[in-house]
Every structure is written in C-alpha cells, then in structure tokens.
Amino acid sequence: MDIREIIARYQDKPGGLIEAYHAIQDEFNYLPQEAIREASLAFGISEAQAYGVATFYSYLSVEKRGKYIIRMCESAPCHVAGADELLKALEKTLGIEVGQTTPDGKFTLELAECVGQCQETPVITINSVPYTDMSPDKISAVLAQCT
Amino acid sequence: MAQEYRIVLANAGKIDPASLDDYLNAGGYKSLEKVRTMSAKELIDLVRSSKLRGRGGAGFNAGMKWGFVPETAPETYVVCNLDEGEPGTYKDRTIVEADPHLLLEGMAICAHAIRSKQGYIYCRGEYPFVVDHLNRAIEQAKQSGQLGDFNIEVRMGGGAYVCGEETALIESIEGHRGEPRFKPPFPGVAGLWGKPTVVNNVETFANLPAIVKNGSEWFASIGSPNYPGTKVFTLTGDVVNRRPFEVPTNTTIRELIFDLGGGIPNGKAFKAVQIGGTSGAFIPEHLLDTPLDFDSMRDAGITLGTGAVFVMDETRDMVDVVTRIAKFFEHESCGKCNPCREGTFRSYELMKKIKTGQATPSDVENLSTLSKVMTKACLCGLGQAAPTPILTTLEHFSDDYKRRLLAAIS
C-alpha cells in the first residue's frame, strides 16, 4: 500500500500520528523519509516535529531494516541469565554486529529493553514474536523458521 | 505456608479468554450492570472506602483519584496504563491475556463514576498480540452491547519506558514524543487533550468488578489494612517457580520467594531481591519478613512498585547488575530535564568505572551524592527512582563495591 494511503487512514484520528507510523512500519519495516514528510503534511506539524516523534520511540526506525528484526533483551533479568553470551552467539551466527543488517537484507539485529517475558529468560523477539529461554545452541533452529 | 488468593486472576485458566460467553457465565459484566443503578458519587464512595490503592506503583487511593475529576466536566477520559515496561514485570500481560473482559468491565465501571464516554488502553509496543487480543474482546463487548455508550480504543506505544509515567503516556496518546508534563495540573483536572482524565493501571481496573460485587468491606478486610486486597507478583531471576502469583498484601517477601516461589535453585543461597521493577530497591536477607504492602515496604526503606520480583543468588555481583541497570536508565531517560538526562549518563559512567576496577572512593562518594540529588531534582518518577538500585546496593551490599575499589588500588 502507498504511504499516503496508509497515513490517510489515521489522519482524522486524534493523536493518530504514532498509529500511522506503526502501520507504515508494518508495511516497510522502517519509516522512509517520505513517510516523515507526508505525515507532517497530513497532521499539520513541521517535518522536524514529525521526525522528533519518529526518533523518540525505540520501536520506530528511520533507518532501513531487514525483513526480520531480531531484538535481544538486555535488561537485568535477561542479563543475569546470560544475555551477553547469547548476543555474541547471535552476532557470530548472523555475521553482523548490533545495529546492522545482513547483506542480503534478511536480518537486522537490535538490542531491546525488557519485552515482558521475564518468566523464561533470556528472551529475543523476531518481528515482535517472543522466543523465550533462549541459548546459543537454539539460535540456528529459531533462525531457520524465518524464511 | 503462604497461599495464593485470586481476585484479578480468579478466572485465569478457568475460562476461554477469547469467549465473551465464558466471561458472562462466570458472572462477568454483572458488576457493571449494578453500578448503572448507582450514582457516580455512591460509586466513588464505594471504591474510596474499599481502600483500593493504585497497583501501578504510586499506591494512591483509586476512589480519591476519581474524585478529583470535576462533576461538571462535559468531557472526560478513562485511560488504562498497559505500558508495563519495568523489567521483570509481566503481570498486566498475564491479567489481560487470561481475562480481557475483566479489564474492559473495570474501565467501564470507572467511566460511570466520572461520566466518561471514551476510554483508551495504552498498550506497550512489545505486546502487539495483546493489542489484537484486546481489540477482539472490545468488538465482542460492543456487539453485545455490554459497554453501553462507552467506547474503548487501544493505542500501541513505541517501546519507551518513560511512557509508563501518566503524563508522558497522555502525551504519547496525543501523538507526541512521550515526555512527561509538569504537575500540577494533574490529569484528573487537565489530562488527555486538556480534559479531566483518570489514568489507572490494568490491575487497579481489574479489581473493580469484584469490589462492586462483594462490597468495600469485603475488600478492605483482605491483606494489610492500609493497602488491602491482593497484589500480583511476577517472579524472575534465580528462583525455582518463575511465574505470576496473586497473594494477599500481608504476605511477606520471604513467603513469596521461598514458599510460593520454591526458593533458590541449584542449592545456592539467597543474596538479594529487587522488587517493583528495575527502579526498585535491592533488598537484603534481613528485610525479607516485610509484608508486601505499600506502607510496610516504604517504612522499611524499600518500594513495592509494579510487582516484579527479581531474585539473585549468592553468585551474583551487585555491581555488575547495577551497572546494567544504570545503562537502562541512561537509555530510557527522555532528556527533557537536566538532572535526569545528565544524571543517568554520569551514573552509568561512574558505575562502569567501578565495575572495571578504575574507581576511587571519591567516585563512589560522588555517585552517592549525585544519586541523592536526582531523587529530589528530577522532573518525573523515572529520574527520581533511577538511583534507587545504586543507593540501596551501596547501603546493603557495600562489599561488592569495596572489592572493586581495592582492585583499583592494587
């Protein structure tokens, strides 16, 4: 769907800017520059304000990202459960560092704060689906589900 | 032996959360029917005298909070805080996943008290599946006419911890950066779009149907007299049973961790527990007999917070854990006020220095002074509570710090 069409769906909703951003990300996995510009026009705010909202929230990204966004929780409960080792293993398996996207555009690796699944730590999410009780030896099987 | 007592999780596991009929068969929406025969004032008095206090961390009397909304206000809003971002907390997700209509009914009860036609549920961005789940339940409730003329909309956050603060949450619903507002005015007078607004936590709303059904005296007689009822705690870290428990508020920390939680795994000894989320106090062994109610915890110099219970065994190094927490606050500070923006940055810098054995005793002094300044000078609860893990570990686990300083000297 076209960016303008998506924004138009939320334009009349009070405070609909963030909802519109979420909907654009559902389609593109990030907020292209055009989205910021179109949103500023539609919601009657400056481009700087629209950019300010887009960059305030860690779930919104103005950088191009991969098809699958892997977020690894590094909050204290995951930290003591071995998040550091898990992160190293993820970086090694994917061949990228945190904040990067694989050359084929398939995976982006990000750090996250608590994702609310602290009953089975450590936790990663892939496109917001949680994978709990993770360990380095489970990475290959989890990534294999991303096709 | 401590036991669970279920009010907000009474239906959990017993009904199909996707089925409105199941909820109705369990007595659902009967309390909402009942409040429609009551005046707004009678309802507020009922909730006030039940002594239900906010379950999101601040512990304010819910009925009193509703009472701040002017009776003559033509437009008011009911806002549910489902932004649970405190690491270690998953209680609100648990409640809503198990029994979504309980929350909707609770919000509609509040709407009757403040004459509101519009409610919002602000759900954290990490829970898109909960947003879908709630939207299905709202659709069912609307179609069957349960909510009357009260409309509820779910808004999804964007992964900003500060949006758990009620005025930052309101800013975010309005489509802005989630930066807290100056108070006063409080939301009860000027909240969402400048209109009187009640913001309550999921668990607070979820208690309402039972209070309306059974009466305020019933509720006030459960648990501790000053903070009656139950509290849902979510266990995480070095504890055998890592799951949610709903207990009366006179249950002690020790009972929760050792009776219900099953104690520390792998034969290790207890070292510390952090309660209330990542901004909570680190609690040593000698305070474990404190009851889990707001006032008893506060009197012991610790906090009840959101209900996260993060247990650490004897092998955990407090400096390592607190350094990680300091990084969390440096990342999550919204940057609006200077004491928090700079304070969280410097706290993390000093914690890293201590962790890597490069700190002197004067660095620890400075860290302690900075922490105390932040508790007083920061604009909102984020910055005011951010130093709590540092201050309480300095107080109760100073050996972990001293060990690092000695390493620096040698």
Image (cartoon, coloured by chain):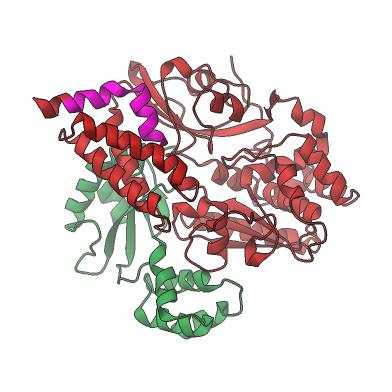
Chain colours: A green, B red
Q: Quadrant of residue A68?
A: bottom left
Q: Quadrant of residue B398?
A: top left
Q: Nearer the viewer, residue A95 or B404?
A: B404
For the question of whether residue A116 can be seen, the reply is no
* Residue occupying the far left of the picture: B410
User: Going 63% across and 26% down the picture, which residue do you hit?
Assistant: B249
Q: Is residue B384 left or right of residue B81?
A: left
Residue B72: in magenta span: no
In which quadrant of the rendered image does the C terminus of chain B lie? top left
Q: Is residue B26 left or right of residue B186?
A: right
Q: Which residues are magenta?
A: B388-405
- Residue B264, relative to residue B56: is it above or below? above
In which quadrant of the rendered image does the N terminus of chain B lie? top right
Q: Nearer the viewer, residue B376 or B27?
A: B376
- Residue A29, image x, y percentages: 37, 70
Looking at the image, how many numbered discs can be counted on the residues? Answer: 0
- Residue A30, image x, y percentages: 36, 71
For the question of whether residue B115 can be seen, the reply is yes
User: Going 28% across and 42% down the picture, which residue do you hit?
Assistant: A83
